[in-house]
Amino acid sequence: MSNLVIYLIGTTFVAGGLAWAAYELGASLIWIIIGVITIIGLGIMAAVSKTRQKESSDTNN
């Protein structure tokens, strides 16, 4: 399993846990959805930046 998938699974668990907590605290459904979308978006950006392959330069001809 690649590191990207592990990051995304972890982000999903975090978003789900926070959504559940917000629901139990009585937050409005629209704010829960906005929060989940934001957390997943940040998780995707972090996962891509951490697992991105470094490009090698072709300076040796």
Image (cartoon, rainbow, N blue to C red):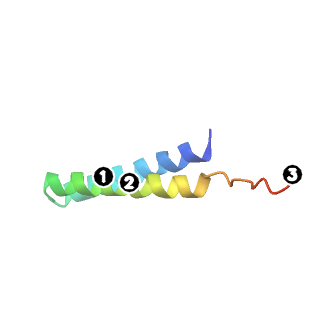
Near mark 2 (Cα within 10 A), the count class, few <14, some 14-19 or many ≥20, is few
Q: What residue would you read off at disc 1? A: 37
Which mark, residue 41?
A: 2
Foreground: 13 or 34?
A: 34
Side of 22 relative to 49 (left or right): left
Residue 40 horizontal/vertical position (percent): 38, 52
What x and y, as percent, mark residue 3? 61, 47
Q: Secondary structure at mark 3?
A: loop
Residue 61 numbered mark, or none: 3
What is the secondary structure assignment of the residue under circle 1? helix
Query: Of callouts 3 and 1, which one flags the residue occurring earlier in the amino acid sequence?
Result: 1
Identity, as a three-letter code, of the amino acid under mark 2: Gly
Which of the marked residues, 3 or 2, is nearer the chain's N terminus? 2
- In the rendered structure, which amino acid carries the disc numbered 3? Asn
Q: Are marks 1 and 2 in contact (CB under 8 Å)?
A: yes
| Secondary structure type for disc 2 | helix
The outermost residue toward the right is 61
Q: Is residue 19 left or right of residue 60?
A: left
Per the model, the C-alpha gap separating discs 3 and 1 is 46 Å
Q: Nearer the viewer, mark 3 or mark 1?
A: 3
Where, quadrant-wise, is the N terminus in this rendering? top right
Q: Who's the residue at 61% across and 52% down the image?
A: 52
Q: Position of residue 11 (x, y in %)?
A: 44, 52
Q: CA distance from mark 1 to mark 2?
A: 6 Å
